[in-house]
Image (cartoon, rainbow, N blue to C red):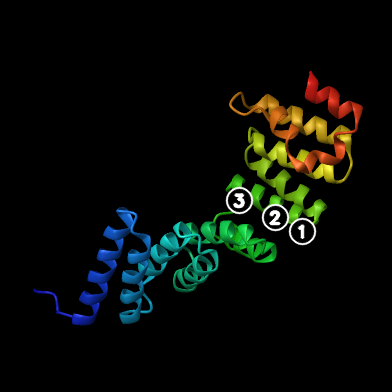
Amino acid sequence: MSRRIDPNRDAAIAFYNEGCMLARSKSFEQAKIKFDQALDINPDYVNAWYNRALVAHQLGQLHDTKISLQKVVKLDPHNTDAWHRLIIVNTHLENYEEALSAIDQVIEIDSNNCSIWSNRGVILSHLQRYEEALEAFDKALDLNSSYSLGYYNKASVYAHLDQVALAIENLRQADSKTTSIDYREKARIDRDFQSLFHDKRFQNYLDR
């Protein structure tokens, strides 16, 4: 049985496919125009909104990226890729409360992802909600005790709280979980640890 022809649907798909080809050739401005044309025909075209967000991000248009991603998650609330990108964009825009809301949406979909709990801790730290941040990092480490970044992020919170011994302890834990990242050198240039630079214990840790 042949498919019923829908000229509007076919036109939207044609514009969408043109946009995808232009995006692959890095013609991002032209790709965005094609996605807009597809969306003029079908405002509920999830893939067109998502790819529009990708090209807007490539063009450095963060606010436009955010608008497109918000359309995606409204139409497809379980689209974790879109939620993750919305977290990144809101973080870059320093919209930390909105980033936190997006993180909580991802946790509702997948609560066993250690990296999203760690991201939640980072955002809470930006909001200076340090006790909640530590709880989030502990949750990440409960899920994966070898997650070295979780220990590093905990250390940065303890640095903000001026708890030098706990900061160093967690940095050492991070060091012990991986050989691919030099957390000592990372901490040396990380502004989150700036308040500890005057402390002899922290200097001893950096210099050993």
Question: For mark 3, what is the residue?
Answer: 116
Per the model, the C-alpha gap separating discs 1 and 2 is 6 Å
Tally the numbered discs.
Answer: 3
Circles 1, 3 touching at the beta carbon (< 8 Å)? no
Quarter of the image holding residue 143? top right
**Which of the two discs, 1 and 3, labels the residue nearer the N terminus?**
3
Residue where numbered disc 2 is placed: 123
Name the amino acid type tagged 1: Leu
- The answer to whether the residue labelled 1 contacts the one labelled 2, judged by CB atoms less than 8 Å apart, is yes
- Label 1 neighbour load within 10 Å: few <14, some 14-19, many 20+: few
Q: CA distance from mark 1 to mark 3?
A: 17 Å
The structure residue drawn at horizontal position 49% and vertical position 69%, both measured from the top left corner, is 73
Tell me which amino acid carries mark 3.
Ile
Residue 197 vertical position relative to residue 91 in the rendered view, above or below: above
Task: Using a 10 Å C-alpha cutoff, classify the residue at mark 3 as few (fewer than 14 neighbours), some (14 to 19) or many (20 or more).
Answer: many
> Residue 58: horizontal and vertical position, in percent?
45, 57
**Seen in the image, is 117 located left or right of residue 187?**
left
Return the residue at label 1: 127
Tag 2: Cα neighbours inside 10 Å, few (<14), some, or many (≥20)?
A: many
Q: Quadrant of the N terminus?
A: bottom left
